[in-house]
């Protein structure tokens, strides 16, 4: 294959439709189509990463909601399923790099598109830092050799987490700079290992069950004396589930590098989300039913790592934890990859500073190299800023999730408006919600608003858990996101807006009158 539209015996059969969809947005095909069905699925499921999310924040869920926090898992799944179904219709119509940005732009106009893309790009960089912190939760549990700084408590845990996270981000930067094919190979191999390990872990934990399902109704008496009672504690604990089930849109964001993405991307989105829900839910359930002591303090401190080591023994437990390390690595790789495609998509519309450089595709590696480096450096910078923050895990994770929920709203809300106006029609012969489109879209928007408010709520337990109480820490999510959102949009409005337009080197050769800034609704 010599170029993005090069044809092969069979896979290229889907290219005409996909290239037309790209041309409708004003772009010419540039990225090489090399990714198959499993690669696309792997991109979505590695971003969600069953083992990364469950092992990183299980302790948080139990600490703030007790075993009954498990019910937040199906709650979050149902909410995110509504969002994913909307995305499936869009992925079938527009399987394009930087999908969130381009979808928001097509549905809501150039201003909404820019704001949604900016929030998602910032969230991707914050997520890069959040996922990198998962090394600290796992590697020192395997061996104390990985605790390079201090004893792993307080500030020393944060400092060591920053060190390990920096190494991981440096690795994903190098891999992504060398092209999508290398990334896909590593990612697919890692996902295969993660899925096998996750299924084996489910079976092993099931074989060690010591109590009945009623254990997941135990609240540990949390929430007593609070205005909302246990419901308030449950909403706090739901962060542990909300952190896992997002990023499924990555399957579409690699659409310009995939074979027949109009058909494969919607399937990959749903398969990744459903597989994560089923396997992850069983891991969490059986862990609570198998742990030797449900009230052990380590359960709310060391989390699933403690469950695995205490239940399965040191040898088997460490093998599982090494698989978790692999899962964290490929998850970080997928997060980095998605961020790069988003930066590329915004840059080729001249919507970022130094756009022509950011949108440049390396002729050797056939991937945008500069965004890989810049996103990696920003991710490391976010870690360094929080190096002395003992609650670094919950703070960075919370902010990353909220920003992604808001970015998703920049798609689902304009999509709902277009539906109500009768302007949205799914592409014929591809994924469609039919008559269920409107109610699903309404639920997706309501879910997005509700969880954004819940996650950003100024709880001391999340944003100021240790040390003296400061208002700016408790309101940290609102302050950070407000500065990023308002400051970023002000820059766009006064500086970048007047420059917006597809760069000549990326523009489609077409007589179509549509432009990248076209705010009209999609047509079938």
Image (cartoon, helix red, strand yellow):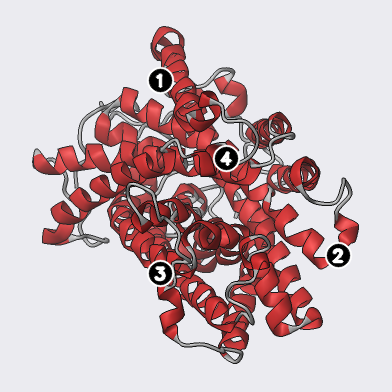
Closer to us: 494 or 134: 134
Q: Which mark is residue 510?
A: none
First along the sequence among labels 4 and 1 = 4
Q: Look at 16% across and 49% down and name the residue there.
A: 425
| Residue 274 drawn above or below residue 310 | above
- Gap in Å between the C-alphas at discs 4 and 1? 36 Å
Provide the residue designation for mark 4. Answer: 395
Q: Look at 37% across and 58% down and name the residue there.
A: 230
- Gap in Å between the C-alphas at discs 4 and 3? 27 Å
Provide the residue designation for mark 2. Answer: 143
Provide the residue designation for mark 3. Answer: 274
Note whether residue 24 is visible: no
In the rendered image, residue 327, in percent from the top left (x then y), is placed at: 65, 63
First along the sequence among labels 2 and 4 = 2
In the rendered image, residue 497, in percent from the top left (x then y), is placed at: 39, 14
In the rendered image, residue 243, in percent from the top left (x then y), is placed at: 50, 53
Residue 223 left/right relative to 376: left
- Quarter of the picture containing the N terminus is bottom right
Which secondary structure lies at badge 4? helix
Q: Badge 4: how crowded within 10 Å, few (<14), some, or many (20+)?
A: many
User: Which label lies toward us, 4 or 3?
Assistant: 4
Q: Which mark is residue 501?
A: 1
First along the sequence among labels 3 and 2 = 2
User: Which label lies toward us, 4 or 1?
Assistant: 4
Q: Quadrant of residue 208?
A: bottom right
Closer to us: 2 or 449: 449
First along the sequence among labels 4 and 3 = 3
Closer to us: 59 or 521: 59
- Gap in Å between the C-alphas at discs 2 and 4? 26 Å
């Amino acid at each position: 294959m010599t170029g993005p539209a090069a044809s092969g015996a069979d896979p290229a059969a889907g290219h005409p439709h996909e290239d037309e969809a790209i041309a409708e947005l004003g772009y010419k095909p540039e990225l090489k189509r090399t990714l198959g069905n499993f690669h696309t699925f792997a991109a979505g499921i590695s971003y969600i990463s069953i083992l990364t999310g469950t092992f990183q924040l299980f302790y948080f869920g139990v600490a703030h909601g007790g075993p009954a926090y498990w019910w937040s898992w199906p709650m979050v799944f149902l909410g995110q399923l509504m969002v994913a179904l909307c995305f499936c219709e869009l992925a079938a119509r527009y399987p394009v790099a930087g999908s969130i940005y381009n979808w928001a732009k097509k549905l809501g106009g150039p201003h909404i598109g820019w704001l949604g893309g900016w929030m998602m790009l910032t969230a991707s960089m914050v997520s890069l830092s959040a996922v990198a912190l998962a090394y600290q939760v796992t590697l020192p549990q395997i061996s104390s050799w990985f605790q390079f700084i201090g004893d792993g408590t307080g500030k020393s845990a944060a400092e060591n987490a920053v060190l390990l996270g920096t190494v991981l981000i440096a690795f994903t930067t190098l891999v992504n700079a060398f092209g999508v094919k290398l990334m896909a190979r590593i990612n697919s191999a890692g996902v295969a290992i993660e899925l096998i390990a996750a299924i084996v872990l489910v079976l092993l934990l099931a074989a060690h069950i010591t109590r009945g399902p009623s254990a997941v109704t135990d609240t540990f008496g949390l929430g007593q004396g609070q205005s909302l009672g246990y419901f308030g504690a449950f909403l706090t604990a739901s962060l542990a589930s909300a952190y896992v089930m997002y990023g499924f849109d990555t399957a579409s964001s690699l659409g310009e590098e995939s074979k027949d993405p109009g058909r494969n991307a919607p399937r990959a989105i749903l398969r990744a989300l459903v597989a994560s829900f089923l396997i992850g839910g069983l891991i969490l359930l059986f862990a609570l039913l198998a742990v030797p002591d449900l009230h052990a303090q380590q359960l709310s401190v060391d989390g699933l790592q403690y469950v695995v080591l205490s239940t399965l023994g040191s040898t088997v437990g460490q093998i599982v934890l090494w698989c978790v390390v692999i899962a964290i690595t490929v998850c970080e790789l997928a997060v980095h990859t998605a961020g790069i495609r988003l930066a590329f998509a915004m840059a080729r519309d001249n919507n970022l500073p130094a756009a022509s450089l950011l949108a440049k595709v390396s002729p050797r590696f056939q991937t945008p190299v500069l965004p890989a480096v810049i996103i990696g450096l920003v991710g490391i910078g976010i870690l360094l800023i929080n190096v002395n923050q003992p609650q670094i895990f919950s703070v960075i994770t919370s902010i990353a999730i909220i920003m992604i929920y808001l970015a998703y709203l920049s798609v689902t809300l304009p999509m709902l408006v277009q539906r109500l106006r009768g302007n949205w029609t799914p592409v014929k012969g591809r994924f469609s919600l039919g008559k269920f489109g409107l109610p699903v879209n309404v639920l997706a928007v309501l879910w997005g608003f509700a969880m954004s408010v819940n996650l950003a709520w100024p709880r001391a337990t999340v944003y100021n858990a240790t040390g003296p109480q400061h208002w700016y820490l408790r309101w940290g999510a609102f302050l950070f996101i407000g500065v990023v959102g308002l400051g970023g949009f002000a820059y766009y409005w006064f500086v970048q807006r007047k420059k917006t337009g597809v760069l000549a080197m990326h523009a489609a050769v077409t007589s179509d009158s549509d432009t990248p800034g076209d705010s009209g609704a999609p047509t079938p």
